[in-house]
Amino acid sequence: HTPSTPPAPEPDRRTLLADAWTERARTVRGLPATLATLRGARAELGTARTRRRDDGPGPEPLRESPPARRKGAAPCSINAPTGPRRAVHLAEVNLARLRTAGKSQGATVNDCLLVAVAGALEHLLHARGERPDSLVVSVPISARRSTSSADLGNQVGVMPVRVDLRGDASARLAKVAAETRARKSAPGSSLALVGPLFRGAAAVGAFGWFVNRQRLVNTFLTNLRGPPDSVHLAGTPVTRIVPVTITAGNVGVAFAALSYAGRLGVTVITDPDVVPEGAELARALHTQLAAIAR
């Protein structure tokens, strides 16, 4: 038996002042690492700027990248403020076939999903008379490299992936696979910007304003690994598990994928007032997935 530790006495003002200055000194010492993380975050979120040769010394000025490498998401009609209504549609594909097809080109199932989602949205936008040359799909990634009992909780970053809509599906898949491999080598730095940005916006009541006007991404994609074999509930086999996520702000459609018993189901979640073609979009997604998994 170990006796409990008595509570510490209330600190006096001198102790509090010393602790505050110690924390400030720790912050200053960590400034170089913080700045490096912020630079990585800007690149990860696609907000980095370029320096001109004649800029001279001093802080890096904020300039737009050259047009061929311009950052941010293409403006299109699926990005409009959303309302409270949602519609859900489902597309499915054989998981083993999709994984094998992707592996033959050095790509993962996630890479295949990115290309298929972008291709389905391209089909929808073409029908609306819009022809963007790329779309930005945001996928969640874990920012945690390791953990301990004293450091628990979620640490999730985002990885916006630009999918080039030029070329055929094979060329698109090769580009996406190369980009995601490079980006995953140092994941999670986007938390340095996204976390404080969202918390700050919420604190001043500007979060809704920001998400209704953001130009970083066109859509969201989440992919979860489900049970590899069929499961039962109260003795009854579960034939299908349908993932449902949310979409908000000015993102009119989001996608959620879940593997289960050899199948990969992808849910298309739309605001029917922004994207009334949800059923057609799901059919286009199925066509894209089937073409890759062929």
Image (cartoon, grey):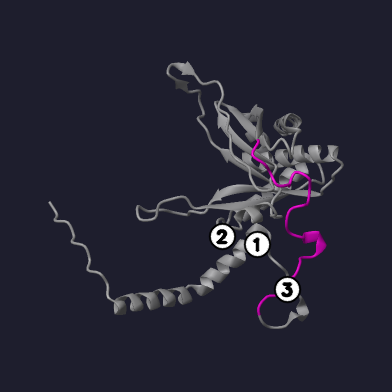
- The answer to whether 92 is drawn above or below residue 251 in the figure is above
Question: In this rendering, does residue 82 appear at all?
Answer: yes
- Secondary structure of the residue carrying numbered label 2: loop
Residue 279 place in picture, x, y as percent: 73, 29
Q: Main secondary structure of the magenta part?
A: loop
Front position in the image: 288 or 174? 288
Magenta residues (range): 59-85
- Residue, far front: 205
Is residue 279 inside the magenta stretch? Answer: no
- Secondary structure of the residue carrying numbered label 3: loop
Query: On the image, numbered disc 2 is attached to which residue?
Result: 189
What is the spatial separation of the Cα atoms under label 3 and label 2, in whole angstroms?
21 Å
What is the spatial separation of the Cα atoms under label 3 and label 1, in whole angstroms?
14 Å
The residue shown at (58%, 58%) is 205
Which is more N-terminal, label 2 or label 1?
Answer: 1
In this rendering, position of residue 70 left or right of residue 240: right
Residue 67 place in picture, x, y as percent: 82, 62
Question: In this rendering, does residue 108 appear at all?
Answer: no
- The answer to whether 251 is drawn above or below residue 15 in the figure is above
Q: Amino acid at mark 1?
A: Ala
Front position in the image: 207 or 69? 207
Disc 1 residue crowd, few under 14, some 14–19, many 20+, Cα 10 Å: some
Query: On the image, numbered disc 3 is attached to which residue?
Result: 51
Residue 147 place in picture, x, y as percent: 41, 53
Corner quadrant of residue 23: bottom left
Which quadrant holds the C terminus? top right
Which is more N-terminal, label 1 or label 3?
Answer: 1
Query: On the image, numbered disc 1 is attached to which residue?
Result: 43
Disc 3 residue crowd, few under 14, some 14–19, many 20+, Cα 10 Å: some
